[in-house]
Image (cartoon, rainbow, N blue to C red):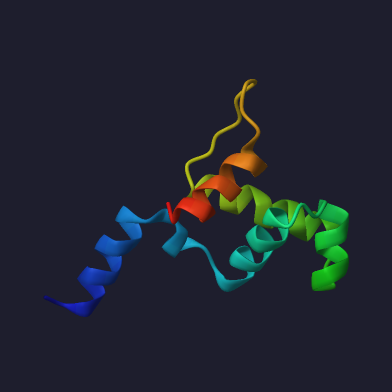
Amino acid sequence: MDPEIMRHLMRAHNPLLRLTDREHEVLALMAQGRSNTAIAQRLVVAGKTVESHNASIFSKLGLHEAPDDHRRVLAVLAALRGA
């Protein structure tokens, strides 16, 4: 099978594979319990940049805003499970 088709199928099956390297870094720091401010300081970026990465992570993992859910926790759980 064509390698590009295989990559596409794998990304569709495992949303963690859709994350960029930087998004994986942000998610790892989230998993350590770091705040957005702490993540921004660690990665030497603006707080708004971290917020953008968070939004992208949530979107790629299919975590939509809901009153009963904490998306940061759900994102970390997805990472731990390997989505």
Q: Residue furthest left?
A: 1
Q: Residue at x 64, y 48 (%)?
A: 55
Q: Residue at x 76, y 60 (%)?
A: 49
In which quarter of the view is residue 40 placed? bottom right
Q: Position of residue 37 (x, y in %)?
A: 88, 56
Q: Residue at x 42, y 54 (%)?
A: 15
Q: Residue furthest top?
A: 67
Count how many numbered circles sit on residues in the image. Answer: 0
Q: Residue at x 43, y 64 (%)?
A: 17
Q: Is residue 48 left or right of residue 10?
A: right
| Residue 7 visible to the viewer | yes
Q: Position of residue 79 (x, y in %)?
A: 52, 55
Depth check, front residue: 81 or 16: 81
In which quarter of the view is residue 65 placed? top right
| Residue 46 visible to the viewer | no
Q: Position of residue 64 (x, y in %)?
A: 55, 34
13 w.r.t. 68: above or below: below
Q: Is residue 30 left or right of residue 66?
A: right
Q: Is residue 65 left or right of residue 61?
A: right
Q: Residue furthest bottom?
A: 3
In which quarter of the view is residue 82 placed? bottom left
Q: Quadrant of the N terminus?
A: bottom left
Q: Position of residue 67 (x, y in %)?
A: 65, 21
